[in-house]
């Protein structure tokens, strides 16, 4: 299995945090960690449906500080699923995917990449490559609108409210 981080925008002042707030009836009593995990799991399930994959959601990873990064979905996928992701993205997002990979592999002021445009395709770099490839899809506003609409229609937070002791 390959461990990857899916950058979907996170929950800090994003459409995803707004959607969770809209879905919660009493936000002060909501188990927010549980809600973020439930939301992200459904997000990954939508990705699986879209790309015909079986990516396994593990948990949300939240940064200590949101000034430089945001939440990501930690996931596992097989090599076969990695091939499916690349195939799907090449077919439907080829030019955007190439631009995103170039962005992550090109040196610029304040950024020195770990990989270049050739070494990113090496098997040992698959986690980074797949993350960058999926990021192309998650950056697509139409895809984001579809997944948010799906989650809004199907996510139930009822079991994630904290009971008051008394």
Image: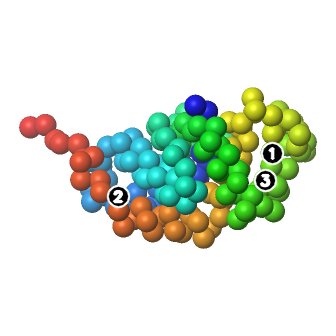
Which numbered dot is residue 100?
Answer: 3
Circle 2: element type: loop
Q: Are marks 3 and 2 in contact (CB under 8 Å)?
A: no
Q: Which residue is mark 1?
A: 104
Tag 2: Cα neighbours inside 10 Å, few (<14), some, or many (≥20)?
some
Which numbered dot is residue 142?
Answer: none
Where does the image place residue 151, in percent across and percent down from the top left? 42, 61
Where does the image place residue 71, in percent across and percent down from the top left? 55, 43
Tell me the residue at 71%/36% (across/down).
Answer: 126
Tell me the residue at 70%/50% (across/down).
Answer: 86
Tell me the residue at 32%/43% (across/down).
Answer: 31
- Report whether residue 161 is seen: yes
* N-term-proximal mark, 1 vs 2: 1
Q: Quadrant of the N terminus?
A: top right
Q: Which residue is mark 2?
A: 155
User: How many callouts does the rendering have?
Assistant: 3
Gap in angstroms between the C-alphas marked 3 and 2: 30 Å
Tag 3: Cα neighbours inside 10 Å, few (<14), some, or many (≥20)?
some
Tell me the residue at 60%/70% (across/down).
Answer: 142
Q: Quadrant of the C terminus?
A: top left
Where does the image place residue 99, in percent across and percent down from the top left? 82, 56
Colour scheme of this structure image? rainbow
136 lies above or below 69: below
Gap in angstroms between the C-alphas marked 3 and 1: 6 Å
Where does the image place residue 135, in percent across and percent down from the top left? 67, 52
Q: Are marks 3 and 1 in contact (CB under 8 Å)?
A: yes
* N-term-proximal mark, 3 vs 2: 3
Gap in angstroms between the C-alphas marked 1 and 2: 33 Å
Closest to the observer: 145 or 90?
A: 90
Circle 3: element type: helix
Closest to the observer: 56 or 72?
A: 56
């Amino acid at each position: 299995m390959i461990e990857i981080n899916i950058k979907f925008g996170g929950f800090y002042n994003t459409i995803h945090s707004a959607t969770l707030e809209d879905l919660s009836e009493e936000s002060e009593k909501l188990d927010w960690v549980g809600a973020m995990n439930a939301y992200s799991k459904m997000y990954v399930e939508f990705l699986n449906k879209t790309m015909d994959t079986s990516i396994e959601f593990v948990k949300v990873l939240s940064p200590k500080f949101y000034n430089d990064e945001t939440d990501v979905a930690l996931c596992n996928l097989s090599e076969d699923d990695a091939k499916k992701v690349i195939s799907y993205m090449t077919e439907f997002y080829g030019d955007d995917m190439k631009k995103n990979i170039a962005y992550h592999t090109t040196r610029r002021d304040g950024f020195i990449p770990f990989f270049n445009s050739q070494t990113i395709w090496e098997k040992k770099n698959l986690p980074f490559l797949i993350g960058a490839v999926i990021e192309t899809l998650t950056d697509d506003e139409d895809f984001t609108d579809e997944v948010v609409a799906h989650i809004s229609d199907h996510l139930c937070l009822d079991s994630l409210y904290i009971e008051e002791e008394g």
